[in-house]
Structure formats: C-alpha cells, structure tokens
Image: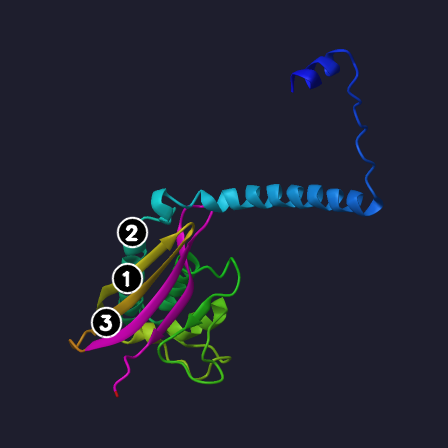
Amino acid sequence: QALLAQAASRGCVRREPPPELSPFSSQMRSSRLAGASVLLVLLGLLGRTANFLGKGGQLRSRITEEEVLAAQKGWGDALVQIATTYEAQGLQAAKALAGEIIDAAYGYNYGPVLFKPTLTTVPQTFRTTRQGALAYFVGDDKDFPNDTGFALKGWRKVEIVNAAIFREGNVAVSVGNVLITDKSGAVTKVDKTWAFYKGKDKKLRIVAHHSSLPFEG
C-alpha cells in the first residue's frame, strides 16, 4: 500500500478512463432516472394523503364527531318540520321547504347522490337526482307516481342511535338505527347509513344515504 501511495504521488499509477456505456446501459440508466423522477412525483402526491395520517398510522379527519351528530340531528329535525308544515300550511309549503332542506342537507350540487330510501320500489328504487329525492319526501310528481311523501306522515320525533362513525379526510360515514315517532305515538325503526362530505364551504352534505327496514327472519 505504501508503494502504491508513492507511485501515485509520482504519477506512475495509470488512471483508467471510465468505461463507455453501451446503448443498452444508457437506456437502463435513463430508465432508472425516469423511474426515480416518477417515484418522487408519486411520493409528493402521497405526501398530501399522508397529511391525513397521525402518529401510529391513525387516520386524521377534517370532520369532527360533533359535526356528524349535528348533521344527523338536522336531518331528523327537518323531517319533523316538513311534516308539521304540511299539516299547518299544506302541500305546496311543505314541498318548498323540502326543496330548501334537500339543497342544504344533500350533495346533489356535487353530482349524483347514492340515495336508497326506505320505501321505494323497482324501477325507481334509487334516487340519485334532486327531483327523485324531493318526490320521495313529499310526492306530488307525475314522474314518480308511486311516491306518497314519506315526510308527510305525521312525524313528531326522530332519535338516532349510531352503531359507529368513520371519519377520514373530508368524508364521514355513520351506520346505525333511526327511530321515528308519529303523532299517534307509533315508532318506526329503520337501519340507516349516511356518508357525509365536507365541501369548501365547510358544511357537511349527504352524498350517500341507505335506509331499510330491519330484517325479520
């Protein structure tokens, strides 16, 4: 090693020029560079999603549980309000109110809402449009002749019993039961799933809603 050091200091050690890369090697190198660039871009995009992750890999949400509970309560209060407005002021007043409530509570302004109401039948089971939702709640639409108005059935109280609430990013999903009491005191129990989306206006709107009567085997 000492001899090599001395030779190097005297310029006696020949430095080999770097080997020329073959076309295939050049392509491989270019592919690696391109792959590295794509990876960096993906990591940048994933970094945005990673912002939703807290310590220990726990999901982070921009929606609080209190916001979900408030949105659920708002839905229940609105159902009762439509029913009492119908009794006090008639169908047209109830229909106008229902339209305002749908615009405030549902995300039809974003696109189709995945709405499967409790009491609908083929071929109009799903109400992905605002018109279909309004017809379900208050009827009075020739395009939906079987709808009699679910919200017009004398409802007086709505109780929501959540089984679980999932929250991540701008989306929250709840599943549980809704107990609806009419003016005679009769209680209707339904299984309910809601998906809420928090938009730029910071308000929660329903983008998916599934409702069905409990199965009795």
What residue sits right under mark 1 in the picture? 164
Kind of residue sitting beneath label 3: Ile
Residue found 33% across the figure and 71% down from its top:
90
Which label sits in the foreground, 2 or 1?
Answer: 1
For residue 200, above or below residue 134: above
Alpha carbon of mark 3 to alpha carbon of mark 1: how far? Answer: 19 Å
Report which residue position mark 2 lands on.
Answer: 65
Residue drawn at x 49%, y 84% as measured from the top left: 123
For the point 81% across and 28% down, which residue is it? Answer: 17
Q: Which disc number belongs to residue 180?
A: 3
Amino acid type at circle 1 is: Ala
Q: Give the residues drawn in magenta, as a range.
A: 187-216
Q: Could you say which disc has been placed on residue 64 in the image?
A: none
Q: Is residue 211 visible?
A: yes
Q: Earlier in the sequence, mark 3 or mark 1?
A: 1
Label 1 environment density (alpha carbons within 10 Å; few <14, some 14–19, many ≥20):
few
Q: Is residue 43 left or right of residue 72?
A: right
Across and down, in percent, residue 76 comes to 28, 63
* Element carrying mark 3: strand
Furthest residue to the top? Answer: 10
In the image, 174 versus 72, the foreground residue is 174
Q: Which residue is the extreme one toward the front?
A: 3
Query: In the image, residue 26 lies at what x, y percent?
Result: 79, 42
Asked which secondary structure carries label 1, the reply is: strand
